[in-house]
Amino acid sequence: MKIVHYLFSTDQRLGGPVRAVSDLCLLLAKGGNDVSLVTSIPTDAPTGWTGADRTPRLVVVPPPARPGKVFSKPQVAAMRPLIAGADALHLHGIWELFNIQLAKTATAAGVPYFISTRGMLDEYCFDHRGFKKRVYMALFARRWLAGARRIHCTADEELRQSQRFFPAGRGVVIPNLMDLAPFADPPGPDLARQKFPFLPAPRPVAVFLGRLHPIKGIDRLLDAAKILFDRGKPFDIVLAGPPESDDYDRQLRAQAQRLGLADSVHFVGMVSGPAKLSLLRACDLFVQPSHHENFGMSLVEALACALPVVTTHGVKIWPELERSGGAVITSAEPEPFAAALESVLFDRSRLQDMGRRGRAWVMDFLDADRVRAQYEAMYRAAATA
């Protein structure tokens, strides 16, 4: 099959969706499909993606030229041959008008289009700046969603919260197709210990990996840590990721200082590649106290490294994570989050057991051949509908 994906930016600092789309394209291509990833900002896009040797084809197009991130007519005309020659167009995200433009182009060419919501239609999103989003839905998005052959969600809970916006039976749940090859034999902790001198620490170490953004609940994590410190249960925290803004970075550092945690909270910036996997192997627990999260690629990466997880019901795959045996699910509020941390972080035997069970679950749940077959079946079934 010829499958075209459009993703506005491949900048890894934007978080999990970028990684998810990149892995999806790569593994679909490895399965023998002709895959093109079209992007307007190719930051962090693999340079070797030429379409040869079962790799995707990277196609860079100029960013939308008109206000509101709208493509000009010449820009759409330039992309039309690529879209018209495809069996499927796959779009990612909800709130951009350029996705609606590309869908119209596909429809005119008789090409079915698919939409991955990426967690943007759930209840939390409409509780925040909900009025503008409802206006956008009424004016633009409902008709666009109704025209999609399938609306792709990555978890049952995401579909449950999203399906009020599109026709019944149109939604499909398929987990992110994740490249597990780097996790088959991940690097040990030595690389991280060389890079970060505070490792190994004499106390347990909890790590957060991702954008430092208010939606991730990092302030609640620091409050929970203070509760345990006051109970005589100190531990170290590694915050690995780029800050959303300089102001938020300063806010978190000031909070750590105010709570007396400055020496225990390590801001290490973005960590990627083998160093990221080594860091996960060097820590004792992965923590993500998110208010809202969709699939949570970093959670799955942690489990793939046999690192157990404490996270919240704000993560849409929390039921799957809980069933894995490698995760504890709780509230993002400081007291229950502190209780969950205390129940795991200081119990070496439980940490090891959860790590083993979580890794085994990931390797089965996200088996590349099985999940890729689900995506291919979605495209084929819809294309013949």
Image: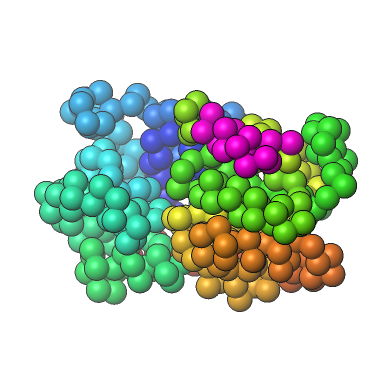
Looking at the image, residue 96 sits to the left or right of residue 217; the answer is: left
Residue positioned 67% across, 62% down in the render: 341
User: Would residue 32 be visible to someone looking at this image?
Assistant: no
Residue 325: x and y in percent read: 68, 73
Residue positioned 29% across, 50% down in the render: 128
Residue 32: x and y in percent read: 56, 53
User: Would residue 199 be visible to someone looking at this image?
Assistant: yes
Residue positioned 43% across, 28% down in the render: 41
Q: Quadrant of the N terminus?
A: bottom left
Residue 207: x and y in percent read: 69, 48
Q: Is residue 76 above or below residue 204?
A: above
Q: Quadrant of the C terminus?
A: bottom left
Q: Is residue 211 above or below residue 352?
A: above
- Most frequent secondary structure within the magenta stretch: helix
Q: Let me know if residue 321 is in the magenta part.
A: no
Q: Farthest residue toward the front?
A: 230
- Observer-nearest residue: 149 or 144? 144
- Observer-nearest residue: 200 or 122? 200
In the rendered image, which quarter is residue 306 located in?
Answer: bottom right
- Observer-nearest residue: 69 or 262? 262
Residue positioned 57% across, 38% down in the render: 255
Looking at the image, residue 5 sits to the left or right of residue 69; the answer is: right
Looking at the image, residue 176 sits to the left or right of residue 206; the answer is: left
Q: Let me know if residue 258 is in the magenta part.
A: yes
The magenta-colored residue range is 249-263
User: Total label count?
Assistant: 0
Q: Is residue 219 above or below residue 244?
A: below
Residue 320: x and y in percent read: 56, 71
